[in-house]
């Protein structure tokens, strides 16, 4: 029976895993070993809506505390400066997989010319506003938001909460592991110490010390679908720029650029393919398009893919130690949170004696998540017809989307109908058919079964959009909303301090 857990790494993945295990299974003895010399990756700042649910509802972390210590801003979605339209917004609420009761077809069939402001979050994004006002003037903070967080502040906050939750921290650099028939039996530290546990969580980042190095699990590359493998990272201190309530993803000559909004800092980075351009060329394009960025931006290398199995014997990997894809949909923390919940469910169900078939099931489910993300990100590239550079031509011609071939064929014949969901290859998808529609409709991917929109339908359509636009015009910006939630009288759904 598992009693002692050792988590290797105290980046956001290791800390979220340790807290999930300790808070949900308090009888476990959870320790974290981490190397202050190696430190944390220090990037990874956009989230999805399952992140606040995990922190507040699942782990029970107080919102007040999180806002005080992590100083987040809100993210309502992603603004894509992308494809033939030049711009479209992906919110966390269903815009296209929805049908207005007074129109005969789902929303996607009306978006040939205009795809914006289809619902409240989309209209807020278009107006650069965060939340509608309550009758008392305060922001009406709805659950369809995520956060922008600074990695360093977030990790510091989690460490404080982890210590308070009874998790022990050991500083030291792991330089080897002993193996037995059940997996890892101990890890060795550089200073000669040896740490033993029944179960290990590998959260050592790209080093993947236990799953990759000690257990030598094979790595599955996503290189035939995702061609980017580096990022130029460089932000600047905010001056007069408004704090936007969304992440921006903007196409570049050999990849794309993110912009993440912190209160005092604008975080910008260019994800590119080293096959297409050199580091110097990428940095030059980045600086040309972002004159406020530092003159020598940092280059981060990565490989897209994940290990064949994420749970091997008594080792489970989370975060970058298990797999990585570029942050085009900010999915890393999303899957850390969801996989930690699955792990806890499985351990509890097996009364801390996990069976091999439960472990296999975990691996299958987790692998499905990774493949869903791979295919969804690949779609972003394949359908973007805007730029005619060698990189984008390569993406259109060679991106392997065989994982979602059936869905794409069905869409090309039938368009954005909800029936497409039955052609999705997996029963679970973090993006759902909505996400796929946003990419297909956003990029104007043609389909054959057209709906002839009547002038009357068009008028209903436009009136609804205008009503959303009008409502958003009186809403609050991020800056105004932050002012409210920082007021000592602000109450988070009646929660106390904790
Ligand atoms: C360019 C880029 C942009 C990204 N953007 C996003 C984003 O917008 N949203 C998102 O969710 N994610 C993003 N990510 C992913 C982000 O890095 C992860 O979500 C997140 O920070 C988790 O990191 P981690 O905890 O797995 O690894 P790390 O932060 O690298 O932590 C690894 C830990 O392991 C320890 N360690 C490693 N080796 C040893 C050893 N031998 N001995 C002892 N300790 C060791 C380290 O000290 C550290 O504590 C991005 C990543 C990159 C590269």
Image (cartoon, rainbow, N blue to C red):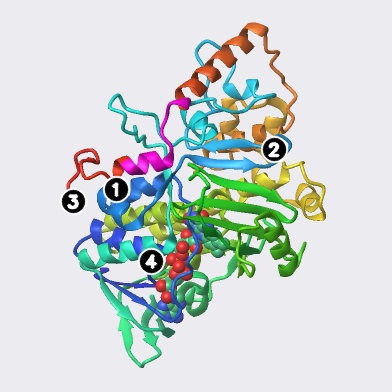
How far apart in space, not on screen, are marks 2 and 4 (Cα)?
A: 38 Å
Labelled pair 3, 4 in contact (Cβ < 8 Å): no
Magenta stretch in the rendered image: 473-483
As drawn, 358 above or below 463: below
Labelled pair 1, 2 in contact (Cβ < 8 Å): no
- Disc 2: which residue: 86
**Residue furthest out toward the left:** 496
Image quarter hosting the C terminus: bottom left
The answer to which image quadrant residue 97 occupies is top right
Of the two numbered discs 1 and 2 on the same chain, state the one appearing first in sequence: 1
Of the two numbered discs 2 and 4 on the same chain, state the one appearing first in sequence: 4
**Ligand 1 has an atom within 8 Å of the beta carbon of the residue at disc 4:** yes
- Badge number at residue 56: 1
Image quarter hosting the N terminus: bottom left
- Disc 4: which residue: 14
Residue at horizontal 75 percent and vertical 24 percent from the top: 448
Residue at horizontal 51 percent and vertical 17 percent from the top: 100
| Magenta-drawn stretch, dominant element (helix, strand or loop) | helix
Of the two numbered discs 2 and 3 on the same chain, state the one appearing first in sequence: 2
- Disc 3: which residue: 497
């Amino acid at each position: 029976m598992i009693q002692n857990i050792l988590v290797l790494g105290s980046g956001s993945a290791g800390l979220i895993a340790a807290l999930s295990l300790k808070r949900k299974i308090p009888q476990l003895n959870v320790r974290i070993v981490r190397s202050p010399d190696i430190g944390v990756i220090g990037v990874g700042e956009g989230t999805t809506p399952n992140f606040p649910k995990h922190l507040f509802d699942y782990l029970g972390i107080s919102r007040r505390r999180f806002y005080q210590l992590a100083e987040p801003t809100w993210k309502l979605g992603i603004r894509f400066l992308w494809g033939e339209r030049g711009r479209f917004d992906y919110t966390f609420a269903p815009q296209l997989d929805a049908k207005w009761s007074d129109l005969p077809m789902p929303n996607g069939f009306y978006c040939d010319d205009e795809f914006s402001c289809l619902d409240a979050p989309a209209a807020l994004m278009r107006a650069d506003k965060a939340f509608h006002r309550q009758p008392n003037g305060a922001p009406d903070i709805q659950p369809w938001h995520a956060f922008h967080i600074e990695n360093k502040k977030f990790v510091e906050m989690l460490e404080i909460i982890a210590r308070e939750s009874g998790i022990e921290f050991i500083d030291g650099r792991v330089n080897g592991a002993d193996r037995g028939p059940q997996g890892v039996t101990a890890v060795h530290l550089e200073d000669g110490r040896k740490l033993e546990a029944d179960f290990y969580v590998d959260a050592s980042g790209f080093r993947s010390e236990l799953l990759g190095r000690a257990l030598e699990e094979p790595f599955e590359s996503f290189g035939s679908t995702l061609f980017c493998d580096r990022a130029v990272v460089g932000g600047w201190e905010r001056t007069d720029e408004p704090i936007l309530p969304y992440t921006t993803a903007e196409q570049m000559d050999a990849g794309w650029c993110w912009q993440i909004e912190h209160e005092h800092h604008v975080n910008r980075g260019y994800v590119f393919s080293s096959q297409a351009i050199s580091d110097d060329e990428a940095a030059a394009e980045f600086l040309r398009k972002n004159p406020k960025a530092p003159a020598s931006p940092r280059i981060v290398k990565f490989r897209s893919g994940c290990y064949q199995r994420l749970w091997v014997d008594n080792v489970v990997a989370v975060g970058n130690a298990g797999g990585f894809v570029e942050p085009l949909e900010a999915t890393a923390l999303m899957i850390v949170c969801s996989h930690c919940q699955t792990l806890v469910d499985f351990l509890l169900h097996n009364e801390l004696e996990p069976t091999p078939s439960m472990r296999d099931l975990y691996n299958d489910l987790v692998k499905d998540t990774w493949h869903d993300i791979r295919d969804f990100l690949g779609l972003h590239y394949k359908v973007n017809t805007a730029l005619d550079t060698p990189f984008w031509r390569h993406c259109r011609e060679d991106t392997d989307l065989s994982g979602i071939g059936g869905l794409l064929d069905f869409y090309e014949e039938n368009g954005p109908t909800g029936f497409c969901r039955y052609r999705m290859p997996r029963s679970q998808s973090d993006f759902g058919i909505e996400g796929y529609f946003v990419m297909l409709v956003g990029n104007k991917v043609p389909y054959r079964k057209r709906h002839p929109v009547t002038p009357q339908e068009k008028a209903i359509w436009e009136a609804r959009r205008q009503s959303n636009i009008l409502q958003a015009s009186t809403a609050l910006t991020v800056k105004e909303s932050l002012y409210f939630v920082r007021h000592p009288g602000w109450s988070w759904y009646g929660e106390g301090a904790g």
